[in-house]
Image (cartoon, helix red, strand yellow):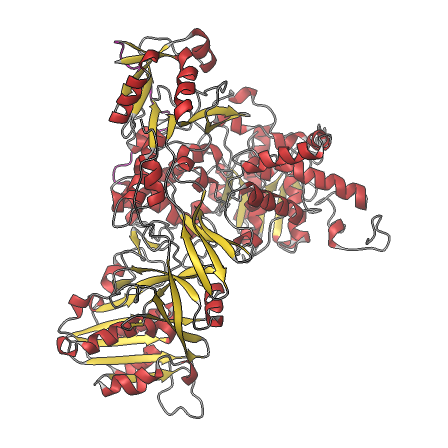
């Protein structure tokens, strides 16, 4: 087992960043964002990032191809999906699981997304295990182990019997953090930067427990019978039909394809889209199979809690709690689950 | 530790191939048929009922069913209904166009084999069904009796008139055409497709029905089929949705966990009965 | 005090629903956390007990009225000062009619900043006033049928403080400042959807045309979106601050809105949106004696 002193983390990241782009959770105003690591930046250990690191693998906007027009004629120039290597440092297990879920969408089936695949292959994930949840966390309800590290290349964790301290102290006093390689890529980093690491025998500090908790047994099955249930009209009344929940969600992955044109040339780009938007399913000619926020809201939560489960065997939610913290109308997935569980199924 | 980007050789399924419109035919006041080819000839070989994404680069992209194909081209019959289709209707022969596909499952050919076939279509809904009708006519030995019931708003709005009144009848297809509103030259039946269907009163025994048309027409046609005692597993329809990717990833065309672009667009009513349907 | 107000609201709602005077009553209820008091929609008198009044009833309920525009019968709702200005906004924009509303007004001492509690940064008892409440000019409801509680004095602090700070910057500094702030925008349109002044049936942002303000997130598109949104509500912004509260990435949207308010006041004379039903927004009409004529 390897360990690294917290004092050395910035230097370790400096060393990594000299060779590869490193994204790390740093303070930006009062919030935490994944930003390219720069010497002198301060790691935020306590809080999860405001936005998930999804953008690093599935950017909010990316060009698919460019084109040129000459009268009736035209040419297409495909964009190369080649991605530069990157290291995402300090992501939490909820966001790690969300990457596993994005993998299912973008890398499985007959069609593989080459942009996502190129980025994914060139990305090293260094996860920081959680030892204490935030108020809004509920990952354990969705089967995510906050110390699982499944899919990570390297796992960083606090050690047992060390007193829990706040982030600044963690830096100032210096404390040992465990580090474990999960893949060959992780091993390579431990080997290449071995000067930063010492051998250490202590166990990881266990996770306390989420204050927010619910059982998910039978949830997908119950929801399957609730498509026409009045609950959707009822809960969605509060919803503003904005895209906050979808855009801050680590697992939401719906996209749109749009274009930009300047004279005789232009490009087509792919960008995030939100199922809550009124144009999402609107067809040419004006027909909309989901005409009101009731249908849009229903689809969003059924996608997360039932449809994705049917298609890929997992919930499309990792319990990161960002929607709890950020929905301006205080609607969140745990509230919806609560309402679903309370609902009487016969009330069709 | 990746020192440099790993090279990944892939074709991006979201990027179209460059094609050309080589022929434009006017079917009705608001429907035109476009023949599309690429440098390598036919863009791909679609099965009946499959789809393709067509794009005008500086306008947009949308999903269309392939209505027919030739040796070196595909045919799309397109109604003028929005930004892209308005622009397509302005396009002349020689226009460069983006094309990608084929997408979707197409019609269940195995299920149709040996059966009598009843094709019911309304308006531009005949476009996807036509690909199947021509496919079956080419292999008429594999199928039993074939019949078409087709309706449009007015006689002028009838698509594929040559097929309806010449080609298909001459190949032994029974064609029944109705219009919502006749004109001075129209001597055929007048009325909506569902009531005309009930009037014709086809026998469900040994028959598969293929229905396509606007959502309301499909809805009422299904009610009529129920009255005529057709089983839902013997009724096939093809659906339309707003689509962006065509490959089951962008999200919007789902019916429950099913993606219409990938798992559809063709479903039996029995399948749809099991799904949360938003049409 | 709050408990009394809460009980009073419950009674009002219960009576209105029992007598059939309103079809639905919009108020606040307790959410997942002590620092959440989200909007509640009460259809039956026996559900009125869910209603609460506390330091977290921050949402502007007026915006929800546009969802009831086709409802036959009346709607009851609780309003703070800012919410009541939202109602005037919607009436002036012909989105709702006064006759269809039963308004329960509550003077407001300002709501607390729940976002700090949600982030675990602060205990619920020590939470500061929400940013949107710090510049409040109208804590007392302007239109109401029933007023619950005693009127409070307005003590606006720093209404134009941020505007003044930014105005002091040079041109390049301003550009850099706003580019940086707008670069964070993720285009979720929460600011639009929560705004009582954003009540177009079909928003320009939901149109699809190449080169229209598309969904691409880059500084140019983001600046275009943010400024267009601000200009669309110019002269009609009631300063409820909901846009900035709803923004998940903390874009200082009210600084833009207040800059426009200040400019309108200096160009067209003093005007407060959503305060007087009869007084038309200055950008809605032209009069010959306008201080700033056509040039």
- Residue A66: x and y, percent? 45, 52
Q: Is residue C30 above or below residue C121?
A: below
Give the side of residue C47 with respect to residue B66, left or right. right
Which image quadrant for residue C245? top right
Locate residue C203: give its quadrant: bottom right
Q: Nearer the viewer, residue A206 or C4?
A: A206
Determine whether, in the image, residue C118 is placed left or right of residue C265.
Answer: left
Number of marks present in the image shown: 0
Q: Is residue A37 left or right of residue C81?
A: left
Closer to the camera, A16 or A300? A16
The residue depicted at 25 percent of the width and 57 percent of the height is B274
Q: Is residue C155 on the magenta stretch? A: no
Q: Position of residue C14 (x, y in %)?
A: 53, 43
On the question of residue C67 being in view, the answer is yes
| Residue at the image point whose x is 48% and y is 19% from the top | A39
Query: Which segment did they paint magenta?
Result: A201-218
The C terminus of chain B appears in which quarter of the rendering? bottom left
Q: Residue at x 29, y 87 (%)?
A: B166
Camera-side residue of B49 and C191: B49
Q: Residue at x 38, y 23 (%)?
A: A133
Q: Quadrant of the N terminus of chain B?
A: top left
Judged by its main secondary structure, the magenta piece is loop
Instruction: Work out whether residue C194 can be spotted.
Output: no
- Residue A246 percent coordinates (x, y): 43, 42
Q: Which image quadrant is residue A216 in?
A: top left
Front residue of this view, candidates B112 and A212: B112
Question: Which residue reaches farthest right?
Answer: C289
Q: Position of residue B241 (x, y in %)?
A: 37, 60
In this rendering, is residue C138 above or below B203?
above
Q: Is residue A122 above or below residue C187?
A: above
């Amino acid at each position: 087992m390897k360990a690294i002193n917290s004092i050395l983390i910035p230097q370790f990241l400096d060393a990594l960043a000299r060779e590869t782009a490193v994204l790390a959770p740093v303070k930006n105003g009062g919030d935490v964002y994944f930003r390219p690591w720069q010497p002198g930046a301060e790691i935020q250990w306590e809080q999860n990032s405001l936005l998930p690191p999804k953008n690093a693998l599935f950017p909010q906007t990316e060009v698919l191809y460019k084109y040129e027009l000459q009268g009736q004629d035209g040419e297409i120039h495909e964009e190369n999906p080649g991605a530069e290597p990157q290291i995402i440092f300090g992501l939490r297990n909820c966001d790690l699981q969300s990457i596993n879920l994005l993998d299912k969408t973008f890398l499985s089936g007959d069609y593989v997304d080459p942009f996502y695949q190129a980025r994914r292959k060139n990305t090293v994930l260094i996860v920081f295990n959680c030892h204490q949840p935030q108020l809004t966390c509920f990952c354990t309800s969705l089967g995510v182990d906050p110390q699982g590290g499944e899919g990570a290349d390297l796992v960083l964790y606090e050690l047992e019997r060390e007193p829990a301290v706040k982030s600044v102290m963690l830096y100032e006093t210096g404390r040992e953090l465990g580090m474990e390689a999960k893949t060959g890529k992780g091993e390579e980093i431990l080997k290449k930067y071995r000067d930063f690491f010492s051998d250490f025998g202590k166990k990881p500090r266990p996770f306390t427990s989420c204050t927010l908790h619910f059982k998910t047994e039978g949830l997908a099955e119950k929801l399957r019978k609730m498509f026409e249930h009045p609950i959707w009209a009822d809960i969605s009344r509060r919803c503003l039909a904005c895209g906050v929940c979808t855009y801050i969600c680590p697992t939401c992955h719906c996209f749109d394809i749009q274009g930009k044109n300047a004279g005789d040339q232009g490009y087509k780009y792919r960008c995030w889209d939100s199922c809550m938007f009124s144009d999402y399913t609107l067809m040419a000619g004006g027909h909309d199979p989901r005409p009101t926020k009731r249908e849009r809201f229903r689809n969003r939560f059924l996608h997360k809690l039932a449809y994705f489960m049917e298609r890929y065997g997992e919930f499309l939610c990792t319990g990161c709690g960002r929607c709890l913290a950020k929905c301006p109308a205080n609607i969140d997935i745990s509230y919806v689950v609560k309402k679903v569980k309370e609902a009487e199924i016969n009330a069709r | 530790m990746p020192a440099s980007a790993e090279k990944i050789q892939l074709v991006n399924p979201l990027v179209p191939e460059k094609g050309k419109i080589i022929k434009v035919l006017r079917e009705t006041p608001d429907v035109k048929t476009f023949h599309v080819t690429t440098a390598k000839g036919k863009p791909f070989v679609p099965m009946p009922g499959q789809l393709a994404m067509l794009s005008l680069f500086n306008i947009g992209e949308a999903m269309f069913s392939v209505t027919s194909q030739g040796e070196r081209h595909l045919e799309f019959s397109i109604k003028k209904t929005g930004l892209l289709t308005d622009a397509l209707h302005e396009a002349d022969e020689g226009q460069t166009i983006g094309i990608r596909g084929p997408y979707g499952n197409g019609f269940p050919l195995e299920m149709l084999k040996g059966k009598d076939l009843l094709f019911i279509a309304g308006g531009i809904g005949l476009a996807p069904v036509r690909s199947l009708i021509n496919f079956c006519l080419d292999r008429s030995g594999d199928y039993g009796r074939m019949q078409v019931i087709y309706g449009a708003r007015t006689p002028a709005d009838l698509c594929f008139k040559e097929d309806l009144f010449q080609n298909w009848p001459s190949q032994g297809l029974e064609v029944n055409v109705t219009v919502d509103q006749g004109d001075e030259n129209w001597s055929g039946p007048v009325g909506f497709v569902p009531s005309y269907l009930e009037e014709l009163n086809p026998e469900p025994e040994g028959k598969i029905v293929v229905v396509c048309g606007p959502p309301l027409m499909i809805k009422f046609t299904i009610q009529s089929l129920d009255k005529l005692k057709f089983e839902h597993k013997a009724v096939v329809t093809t659906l339309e949705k707003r689509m962006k990717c065509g490959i089951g990833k962008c999200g919007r065309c789902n019916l429950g966990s099913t993606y219409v672009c990938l798992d559809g667009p063709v479903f039996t009513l029995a399948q749809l009965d099991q799904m949360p349907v938003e049409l | 005090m709050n408990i009394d107000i809460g009980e009073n609201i419950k009674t009002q709602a219960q009576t209105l629903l029992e007598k059939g005077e309103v079809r639905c009553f919009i108020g606040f209820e307790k959410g997942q956390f002590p620092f959440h008091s989200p909007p509640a929609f009460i259809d039956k008198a026996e559900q009125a007990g869910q209603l609460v009044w506390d330091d977290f009833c921050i949402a502007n309920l007026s915006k929800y009225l546009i969802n009831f525009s086709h409802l036959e019968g009346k709607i009851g709702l609780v309003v703070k000062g800012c919410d009541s200005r939202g109602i005037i906004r919607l009436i002036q924009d012909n989105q709702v009619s006064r006759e269809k509303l039963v308004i329960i007004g509550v003077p407001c001492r300002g709501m607390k900043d729940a976002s700090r509690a949600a982030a675990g940064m602060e205990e619920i008892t020590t939470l500061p006033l929400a940013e949107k409440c710090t510049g409040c000019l109208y804590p007392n409801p302007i239109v109401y049928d029933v007023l619950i509680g005693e009127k409070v004095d307005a003590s606006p602090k720093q209404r134009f403080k941020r505007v003044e700070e930014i105005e002091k910057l040079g041109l390049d500094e301003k550009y850099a400042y706003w580019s940086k702030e707008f670069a964070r925008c993720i285009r979720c349109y929460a600011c639009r959807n929560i705004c009582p002044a954003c009540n177009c049936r079909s928003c320009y942002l939901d149109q699809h045309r190449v080169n229209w303000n598309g969904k691409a997130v880059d500084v140019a598109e983001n600046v275009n979106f943010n400024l267009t949104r601000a200009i669309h509500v110019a002269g009609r912004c009631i300063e409820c601050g909901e846009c900035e509260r709803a923004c998940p990435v903390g874009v200082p949207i009210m600084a833009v809105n207040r800059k426009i308010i200040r400019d309108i006041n200096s160009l067209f004379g003093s005007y407060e949106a959503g305060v007087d039903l009869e007084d038309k927004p200055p950008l809605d009409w032209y009069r010959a004696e306008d201080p700033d004529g056509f040039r």
